[in-house]
Structures are given as structure tokens and as C-alpha cells.
Amino acid sequence: MSRSIRLAVIPGDGIGPEVVAQGLKVLTAVLPPDVKLETREYDLGARRWHATGETLPDAELESLRQYDAILLGAVGDPSVPSGVLERGLLLKLRFAFDHYVNLRPSRLYPGTASPLAGRPEIDFVVVREGTEGPYTGNGGSLRTGTPAEVATEVSVNTAHGVERVVRDAYTRAQARPRKKLTLVHKNNVLVYAGQLWKSVFDRVGREFPEVTTDYLHVDAATIFLVSQPERFDVIVTDNLFGDILTDLAAAVSGGIGIAASGNINPEGAFPSMFEPVHGSAPDIAGTGRADPTATVLSVALLLRHLGLTAEAERIEAAVAADLAGRGTTVRGTEQIGDALAAAAAR
Amino acid sequence: MSRSIRLAVIPGDGIGPEVVAQGLKVLTAVLPPDVKLETREYDLGARRWHATGETLPDAELESLRQYDAILLGAVGDPSVPSGVLERGLLLKLRFAFDHYVNLRPSRLYPGTASPLAGRPEIDFVVVREGTEGPYTGNGGSLRTGTPAEVATEVSVNTAHGVERVVRDAYTRAQARPRKKLTLVHKNNVLVYAGQLWKSVFDRVGREFPEVTTDYLHVDAATIFLVSQPERFDVIVTDNLFGDILTDLAAAVSGGIGIAASGNINPEGAFPSMFEPVHGSAPDIAGTGRADPTATVLSVALLLRHLGLTAEAERIEAAVAADLAGRGTTVRGTEQIGDALAAAAAR
Ligand SMILES: CC(C)[C@H](C(=O)O)[C@@H](O)C(=O)O
Ligand SMILES: CC(C)[C@H](C(=O)O)[C@@H](O)C(=O)O
């Protein structure tokens, strides 16, 4: 019997291709000999948009469907109007492939620098809803560009959408030693959406009696993220709050250079997509200085999603050891990739 | 000629009355002899709601109008359903009195503890829009409580509302030594509102050629708030992003115990309202341990708003000196209030 992974690769813009190359190097190094890796590269992002005006043509979206997973570097460039690639490519993929679990682990590894004094214990995961909320593109503007303009943005939340991501988060909390789940929302102001989230959270919680629960308003959650990050185990929250909290979480736990993420469709009806939380960083693109660690850790999430748990763990152990030994030595993208591939190799 | 300040006082719940008492003590201590202070207390908040079911009756709202300013302690209690007092009292006041400038300074005073390592320079002010955005209460739910529920929240943004707060922020930036204004939004996802904010920001900016401008997505802004808070001078942002950023800003600059705020109607058509950023903290209410500093600094904002600049500066200097000398001595609410009143007194 032989196994294979069909992987679609979207290197994207800026440092995207540089970090993706290292992610693939590490992936190749850890795969068991009987697992064949087939990759296909998709030329999507700023370069393509400038060349052809396309963000994600239907035919390409359709062809991406057949893959087991997608690895994405980063898309975006200041030369492209804000929103074009975000909505036309990145969010289009998340929505089309029903990536309702946007998984973002945060861990302060020994050896990494945190802006927080006293090195608190940080080891939590944010389960960010990925297909609803203020990200649906609902909204519009009236009398645009005039002094009488009105612009709206509609956050759309459904019981269907909230329940599935909340259940996923409980399941993840249940599987962790501390078994704690915190809902983050702003239900004292956003009362309609807040009421839906809170009631679903409470109801689904009855299926998980071992999981301790907590609720925080999003503003208070940011305070705890810097003053007591050790209080968090699993956080579940909506698309926009999750966007904000996970950047903050990355900043307090070793920086955006090591923050990984998975855009997951748990049922496997569509390919899940794995990407570093950081952007395309055009300022350092081409200098060989980008840290590929976030992409490498995203590859670990990808392997775990595909059931290759031991391989995921080898990558995570390699990253932990590498970070612990970094000290003040400055290494480039490729050097770090080589070191991680060598350490994780079977 | 004699002058007078007519001040409406809403002590509120939990530690609210305790910190307000100290705020009034300091206010009385700094006022010039020719300024008469008239206060009237309003019994509003959780206690009142439990007793009568009322949050803010029309007659009281009407009577508040005649005051020069409002000093509010904190409202809210876990015994009141989420949203009732927030929307029925606090936000009702902000909206009814057109408090479109929600002013929240952040400063890391010598002597205060920051969770950030290395004690960065922090001295910025957030101008948070106070009457629009996701706070308008627009939204609803359909098939509530069923598996087919849909709940929406509508962020409403107008050129009218955005322009006035943006101009206020430019004016404040212009008056500060660094003259730098950062717009925070999420215009790559919330494209309609984001486009309105960005175009107004750019257009009004042409009236302030000396002010340096910058734009950050809200997620990136949280990263900079912990990694490079010194990059901020004045921040202008919408109601919800401002809520989140100012709690985070308070957390990194000495804690929520010293964060002051003003809900300002710059035209003076309605009374402006001053309140600490913290809540009613029912867990420490009655213990005499609440820090009144945030309320005292809110009183300084109040005096500045009423044109009593020298008095505001005396309070701020007293607070700075007090914080610098705190060391590890633990003092109670009243002791801190007494010390600040004595130091600020003329
Ligand atoms: C680029 C942007 C659309 C995206 C988001 O807001 O989700 C990014 O910030 C992220 O967190 O992946
Ligand atoms: C209590 C709540 C409605 C309020 C807000 O969200 O504005 C508070 O968090 C604040 O920042 O003053």
C-alpha cells in the first residue's frame, strides 16, 4: 500500500516564496518513505493581479479542490489596493472551502524573546471562526464620496456557524491537560450576536462537563493577554476578534515570525489551508532574512491535520530545540530551514 | 464676577462611589476660590435597576443636560443581564449627548509597573469615535434560539461622524510636540467603512500639513502597542477598535487603575462626561482597596475641558509625583485620594 499527499502550494508575494521553500524542505525531510508528496504551484497574489487583473479565477479555485491541503506563504503588496487580494484571494479561499476553524496556537518557547517582562507561561490556542462575522463582505456605502456618505458593515452570525466552531473548540479543550475554554466576545454591546454566541457556548458546554468555561469581553481579554496570559488554554471567538487577538498573542509569545495557522475544514469536505500568520513583509523580501519558522510550524499543523502526528511532533520538537539554541546568532531564511530540516529528518 | 461648575455625579456601582468620592475631593482641593462647585448626585446603575427596573428615565436624561459636565464612577454588576446598563445607561448617555470624541490618554509614568520589559516610552492619546460604528445598536436576530438563528450587528459609519472626530484628532496631534496621527482600522476586510475612514482621513489631513500620518490595521496595531508603543502619538479609530485598543493601552501603561477617559462633545452643545476606563470591580468593592487614580485623572480631563488648564496640570503633576513615589507601600482608596488632594491643592 502506498500513501500520497497532494499539496497545492501558493507561495504568494514578498517573503512568501522564500518561507514556503523552507516549509517544503522540512516537509520533504520528515515524510515517511512510503508517503509520496505531489505538489503543484499556483501563481496567485500581487504579481499575478498586476499581470492579468485576476485574483482567483474560478477554474483555479475548482482545481484547488482536489488537493489534500494547501500551503500558502503570504499574499499582498502595497501596490495593490487594500482589500483586493484579501477579499479576492485569501478570504475567498477561506469561504469557498468552508474553513470555519481558523486555528492559531500561541506558545512562548524557551529561547524566544517576549516583550513581556518575567517570561510568563504561554501555551494556548485560539479557535477563530473563519467563515462568518464581520468578514462576510456584507455591507455597502450610500452617497459614496459625498458629505452625506453612509457606510455599513454587517456582521452575520448563524447558529449553524457558531455551533460547529464552538463544538470544535470544546473538543480541542477536552483533549488538552487543562481542559479550559474561554469564550471571547463583546456581548454587552453586540447583544444580538453576543447572545447567540453565549447561548450556544453554554448549551454545547453541557456536552463537555469536564471542560471548565470562562467568558471575557474582547477588551478585557487583551488586558489578560499581556498581564496573565497563563490563564488561557483554548479561546474560541469570532472572526474579527480572533484576528485581533491572535496578532496580539503572537506578539507576546515570541513574535509574528513564529506564529502558525491552519484554516481548517474539519470534515475534510474541502482542502484545509495552512499559512503563517505574518504577511508578505515586502520590506525584507529578497534579503534572505525572513524567518521561515512560522511556515514550518504551519507545515506541522498540516501534517497533524492529515493524521501524520508523529511527523508533526518531530517538526515541533525541532523548532523548540532550534529556538532554545538561537541565542544571538543571526541566521538567514535558508540556514534556519536547513537546520530545521536536518533536525526533523527521520 | 464669580464662576461656577455645575457637575452631575453618577457614582454608579461597585467601586464607583468609592473612587468618585476621591475624585470630588481632589476637584474641590484644586478649584480656585472664585469657582463655586455645585454637584448633584444621580442614583443610576445596578442598584437602581434592581429597585425600580429603570436604567435612565427620560426626565433624568433631560435634567442632566443642564450640567456643565458629568463625572461617572462605574456602572454594572454581574447580577444585571449583560447589555442592560451598558446600552440603557452608559451608551445612552454617550449617544444622547453626542460624545463623539472618546478621549483616552495613555502614559507610562515613572514608578508604575508595566508588563512590558525594558520600560518603553509610552505617551499617546487615543481619540476613539463615540457615537457610531458597531455601537449603534443596529442589528437583530431572526429565529432566535433555534438551530436556524441568524444574528446580525451593523456597523454604521457616516461621513459626518467620521469627519468630525478625525478633525478633532488632527487638531490634537497638531498641538502636540511630535505631531503624529495614526489611523487604525481594518480597511482590507471592512472595505466600505474602511474606505470612508481612509478617504476622510486623507482629505482632512491636507488641512494639517505639519501632521505626519500613518495607517495601521487594527491587528497590526496591537502588535506595535506591545512591541513599539513609542511609535504612537495620537491614534484615531472607530468605536469598537478604540474600545479594544484602549484597554490594551491601559494594560501596557501602568494598568487599568490609572486609565482616564473623557466622553466629549467638543462643541459644548451637551455636557461631556468623564469616567475611569475601569469597571465597577465588584470583587474589591467595599474593601477600600480600589485605586482612585483613574478617576482623579479623569477629573483633570474634565477641568481641561472646562478651560481650567492650570488646575488640570496640578492634578496631573500630583499624580505623576505620587506614582513615582509609590514603591511597594500599599495604600487604600482614601489614603491615595488624600495624598493627591493635598499635593494638588493650591
Ligand atoms: C490579510 C487579512 C485579510 C487576514 C485577516 O484579517 O484574516 C490576516 O490579518 C490574518 O489574520 O490572516
Ligand atoms: C462597558 C462598555 C459598554 C464600555 C464600552 O465598550 O465602551 C467600556 O468597555 C468602555 O470602554 O468604556
Image (spheres, coloured by chain):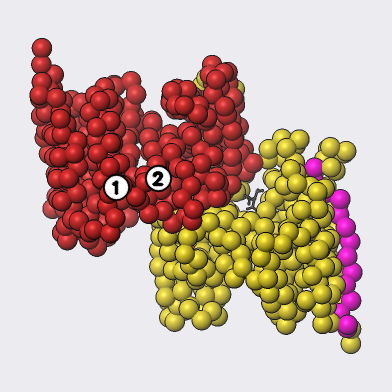
Chain colours: A yellow, B red
Numbered circles on residues, count: 2
- Asked whether the viewer can see residue B13, the reply is no
| Residue at 79% in and 58% down | A333
Callout 1: chain: B
Type of residue at label 1?
Answer: Leu
- Please tell me in which quadrant of the rendered image residue B266 appears: top left
Considering depth in this image, is B205 or B134 the residue closer to the camera?
B205
Query: Which amino acid lies under the numbered mark 2 shown in the image of this protein?
Result: Leu
How crowded pointer 1 is (Cα within 10 Å; few <14, some 14-19, many 20+) is rated as some
Alpha-carbon distance for marks 1 and 2?
A: 10 Å
User: Could you say where residue A220 lies in the image, as x and y percent from the top left?
Assistant: 40, 55
Residue for badge 2: B108
Q: Which residues are magenta?
A: A33-46
Check the image and report above or below for B59 versus A55: above
For label 2, the crowd category at 10 Å Cα-Cα, with few meaning under 14, some 14 to 19 and many 20 or more, is many
Whether residue A333 sits left or right of residue A101 in the image: it is right
For the N terminus of chain B, the quadrant is: top left
- Coordinates of residue B8 in the picture (x, y in percent): 17, 34
Residue at image coords 38%, 38%: B104
Do tag 1 and tag 2 residues touch (Cβ < 8 Å)?
A: no
Looking at the rendered structure, the secondary structure element under dot 1 is helix
Q: x, y percentage for residue A229?
A: 47, 64
Q: Secondary structure at mark 2?
A: loop
Hey, which residue is sitting farthest top in the picture? B1
- The residue carrying mark 1 is B323
Looking at the image, tell me whether mark 1 or mark 2 is earlier in sequence order. Answer: 2
